[in-house]
Amino acid sequence: MSTYRDFTAPIGSRRAPVLRTVGTRERRSHLTAPRVPTVGIDIGGTKVMAGVVDADGTILERLRTETPDKSKSPKVVEDTIVELVLDLSDRHDVHAVGIGAAGWVDADRNRVLFAPHLSWRNEPLRDRLAERLAVPVLVDNDANSAAWAEWRFGAGRGEDHLVMITLGTGIGGAILEDGQVKRGKYGVAGEFGHMQVVPGGHRCPCGNRGCWEQYSSGNALVREAREMAAADSPVAYGIIEHVKGNIADISGPMITELAREGDAMCVELLQDIGQWLGVGIANLAAALDPSCFVIGGGVSAADDLLIGPARDAFRRHLTGRGYRPEARIVRAQLGPEAGMVGAADLARLVARRFRRAKRRRVERYERYERYAEARRTTQESL
């Protein structure tokens, strides 16, 4: 694929009508999609992860780099993506690229309408990258990509009605029903973190108060720990000693590590986060009635320290409890690579167009060679 560098024809406009129909074909197409390598890109506020993924969800090669500073132009991030893809394509026959972006992606999966950690505002990411890479490009929300990966290869296999919740800095989410990601009319379904659970509660960066992610996320976990430490609470002495009094050094992974070692305050903080998680899941169950909730994101590394309390709170707050089936609540299996794997697998749905175009180019070349050979033979006979 090294020759792709020289292919610069603007082809994004020819792709748009096809991409708009992908969503309705996902369940049927993922079984018949070409079993070819594709690249998945997971773009977050701090890192860009790229990998070549085969049709079985196996990562053949992975690259990672820091996300360019958000104050820089969107083109800087696009340049980073292109460099990663071209680097991987030098060693792999890549047929499509899938992008999982931490932001709102429109229903056509072309524009990133808004990204909280990047300078993307109504950015036509798919078309710009397609023009530069000359292979089909698919763009989706990172939580949608992760949910797809867990449904295809991870904790959600065999589930027809699945909801994924990603706990990181905030809360993201995705809905998958009958093998299709439900994106909503405008493409921004699944923003569960901004459901209001405490009227007049903590201020959220989205501008509202009392959003779910202010009570059950990595930010909420760290905020509560720092507040306890700043108040010089006796129960916080363990974590204060651990950071040598530098309260700003308290982080989510540190809290999880101390909780595993038995620190009572850290265990309690994770229980609080888990209980709020269970309350939100019960609300989602009342609205969506899925068979399974998959919990992913960095905070899910706490495992049963978090998910155990979430299951308990879910059972206490579930509408109709005792008289209805309960959805399973499980931890995601693919970890931080789920978004990358899912984006690559979704891209496989549009890879067949590249294969057709490549086949036509080969056929044209072979026809030309036959014509040239026949002409040379004719000239020699004269």
Image (tube, rainbow, N blue to C red):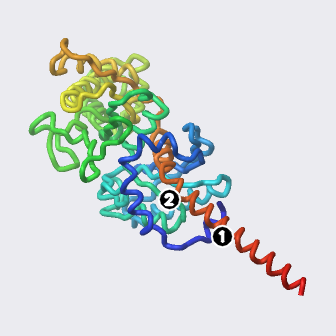
Picture quadrant of residue 280: top left
Picture quadrant of residue 244: top left
353 or 230, which lies in front?
A: 353
Residue 364's label in the rendered image is 1
* Left-right relation of 312 to 54: left
**Relative image position of residue 231 (x, y in whole percent):** 23, 31
Q: Is residue 45 visible?
A: no
For the point 50% across and 64% down, the residue is: 79
Please determine whether, in this image, residue 305 is positioned above or below residue 42. Answer: above
* Residue lying farthest to the left in this orientation: 200
Residue 136's label in the rendered image is 2
* Residue lying farthest to the bottom in this orientation: 382
For the point 42% across and 20% down, the residue is: 260
CB contact under 8 Å: marks 1 and 2 = no
Please determine whether, in this image, residue 366 is positioned above or below residue 159. Answer: below
The amino acid type of the residue labelled 2 equals Pro
In the rendered image, the quadrant that contains the C terminus is bottom right
In the rendered image, the quadrant that contains the N terminus is bottom right
Q: Badge 2, how many Cα within 10 Å: few under 14, some, many 20+?
A: many
**Relative image position of residue 114 (x, y in whole percent):** 30, 57
The amino acid type of the residue labelled 1 equals Arg
* Left-right relation of 358 to 274: right
Q: What SS does tag 2 mark?
A: loop
**Relative image position of residue 373 (x, y in whole percent):** 81, 75
* Left-right relation of 89 to 128: right
**Relative image position of residue 65 (x, y in whole percent):** 53, 52
For the point 34% across and 23% down, the residue is: 329
In three-dimensional space, the C-alpha distance between marks 1 and 2, rounded to whole angstroms, equals 21 Å
For the point 15% across and 21% down, the residue is: 319
243 or 379, which lies in front?
A: 379
Q: Badge 1, how many Cα within 10 Å: few under 14, some, many 20+?
A: few
Q: What SS does tag 1 mark?
A: helix
